[in-house]
Amino acid sequence: MRTVELTDGAIAGAVGSTVLNVVTYLDMALRGRPASSTPEQVVGRLTDIAHVSLGPAQAAENRRSGLGPLIGYATGVAAGVGFALLARGRRQPIATAGPLLGAGVMVMSNGPMTVLKVTDPRTWRRSDWIADIVPHLLYGLAATATWNRLRPPS
């Protein structure tokens, strides 16, 4: 695997993450719903497990607020690199690879949150599932389209 392909995967993952966030923020704006606190809760659980202090209360809260979204971006970029490894430099069909990549990122995001007992998908309402599935699906489609665009023509 060439470095350029891994870099292209990271770029595709970053584009997908940006699309996921834009769609999420649009949903919040349209429905008037609050931001999710789960990313910050994950940071809190991880720092508790690792016995790492984020400082005094206010500073720790602010650090959790910053680190939570960064974990999301790191997950999206890492998924893009993983996608590049699986794609082996070849373009992928957007209609199939996009939804599969989006589902994979959804599992990568929600799996640790479930294990850490930050959330329990068994208790989610239909609107919760839709609010999670749609941005992840669009992540996958955008990341796959970006990956394909970065591939040289065959």
Image (cartoon, rainbow, N blue to C red):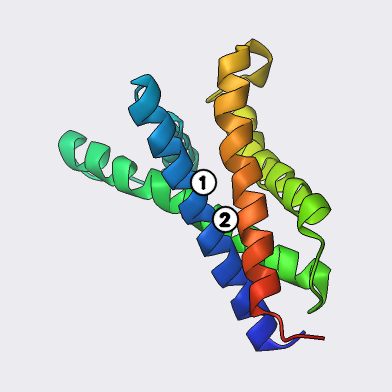
Of residues 131 and 57, the one drawn nearer to the viewer in this rendering = 131
Mark 2 or mark 1: which comes first in sequence? 1
Q: Secondary structure at mark 1?
A: helix
Q: Residue furthest front?
A: 153
Quadrant of the drawing holding the C terminus: bottom right
The relative height of residue 124 versus residue 116 in the rendered view (above or below) is above
Question: Residue 44: percent from the left, percent from the top?
Answer: 40, 36
Tell me the residue at 70%/71% (across/down).
Answer: 148
Say few, some or many: other residues with alpha carbon within 10 Å of mark 2 (under 14 / 14 to 19 / 20 or more).
Answer: many
The relative height of residue 116 versus residue 141 in the rendered view (above or below) is above
Tell me the residue at 38%/37% (across/down).
Answer: 25
Question: Residue 56: percent from the left, percent from the top?
Answer: 18, 39
Question: Residue 104: percent from the left, percent from the top?
Answer: 73, 46
Q: Which residue is mark 2?
A: 76
The relative height of residue 57 versus residue 20 in the rendered view (above or below) is above
Q: Amino acid at mark 1?
A: Leu
Tell me the residue at 80%/66% (across/down).
Answer: 92
Of residues 148 and 34, the one drawn nearer to the viewer in this rendering = 148
Tell me the residue at 56%/20% (across/down).
Answer: 128
